[in-house]
Image (cartoon, rainbow, N blue to C red):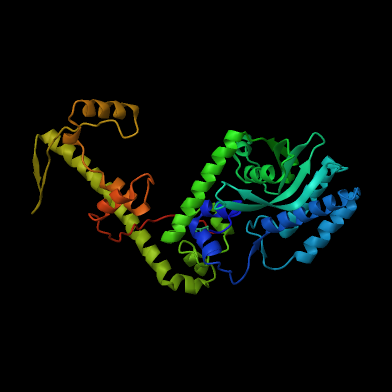
Amino acid sequence: MPIYSHSRLGCYENCPRQYKFRYVEKIKPEEEMETIEAFLGCRVHEALEHLYKYAGMQIALPLEDVLAFYDAKWEGCWSDAVEVVNKEFSAKDYYRVGKKCVSDYYKRYYPFNERTLGLERLITIDLDSSGKYVMRGYIDRLAEREDGRYEIHDYKTSAFLPETDHFDADRQLALYQIGVEKNFRDAKSVELVWHYLRHDKEIRSKRTKEQIDELKKETISLIDNIEKATALDNFPAKESALCNWCEYQEFCPKRRHLTQTQQMTLHEFSNDDGVRLVEKYAQAKSKEKELEEQIEALKSAIVEFAHAKGLDAIYGKDRKVTVSERTGVIFPAAGEEKREALEKILKCSGKWDEISSLDTRALSKIILEKAPTDWDEKLLGEITKFAEKEKRYDVRLGKVKREEE
Ligand code: SF4
């Protein structure tokens, strides 16, 4: 089993297909793209690491030196492969943001005399005693207070500041806590500290033993799911807002055509078979919608006419329309409280079998997705004998938000 990390787990949760590209197929995109957000994060982390390296030698570097280090790193590492995805801003804007992050942090924590035990410290996390579920991570800064409390510090340069509840449920630093508690037995307690540098904010959280035990269980179950997906080669592409930052768009079945069309000339674009098919399909669907609306309007007019004239049938040239009335009933929908009460009555009365039938959709899901996992393999095998696999295609029309829009 591979050694997992928080980012590896996060990658699978965000998009299993991206996980496959990155960790299973280990695809190296031809043009290695680095987003400006990631670039900015690295430069700020380096500057703070530099600052604490000197602080560990009892030297509080002047702010100008730290900023000069940041400048040198920014210039030295810059390349054309750094992509500014959000076209509203320029690289210079991000450079300034990074600079402000460093100087705000500096002013807030000067003279940095807290005891630092490690910078970019590698930590091994054993999730159980089997030695099977081992994870690895890097702590931005591990510190110890005078009273023996340990602190796991994490620097964030993202513009988005999550709500407080997020930190009490955050997985990354809580996983590091497991590693710290195991590897530093003198740690009296461990506190998790996030620095949201763009906002000049410090957020703290603690975990109880019960929360840590629950986290271990959840993480083991997630790793089991990833291993199962790997064995079955089941990595569906999960499209989201994060796709714009994904370096595998040119390989991804959900985004490949988009990236191809973005590189086409106007002439190539209008003559592309895929583009033409989509345009024709969109036109046909819009006519279909119009027709459906017309049919509904005509139906209402026919019913009204038949009522007014007391007719059950209306005749045209060589067609007729019959109008009949029937009474339907509506029961509470699944999930509603009243529905549960209704089902209870039917089940208790022994009449349930007369009105219920096998939910083959739910059964298909269980067979195809092997969920829920508590179904016995033998039972699944028996049921699978009755199932015939067939390919189905859903064709749906959606909107594309292009960058220039
Ligand atoms: S482009 Fe989106 S859907 Fe495709 S692999 Fe990347 S994140 Fe997943």
Q: 307 or 85, which is in the foreground?
A: 85
- Count up the numbered dots: 0
Q: 310 or 7, which is in the foreground?
A: 7
Q: 398 or 252, which is in the foreground?
A: 252
Quadrant assignment for the C terminus: bottom right
For the question of whether residue 104 can be seen, the reply is no
Residue 293 falls left or right of residue 67? left
State the image coordinates of residue 386 (x, y, percent, origin top left). Answer: 22, 54
Extreme residue in the front direction? 130
Q: Residue at x 48, y 74 (%)?
A: 268
State the image coordinates of residue 128 (x, y, percent, origin top left). Answer: 56, 46
For the question of whether residue 21 can be seen, the reply is yes
State the image coordinates of residue 116 (x, y, percent, origin top left). Answer: 81, 46
Choose top left, top right, bottom left or bottom right for residue 345: top left
**Residue 304 drawn above or below residue 349:** below
Q: Residue at x 65, y 62 (%)?
A: 34
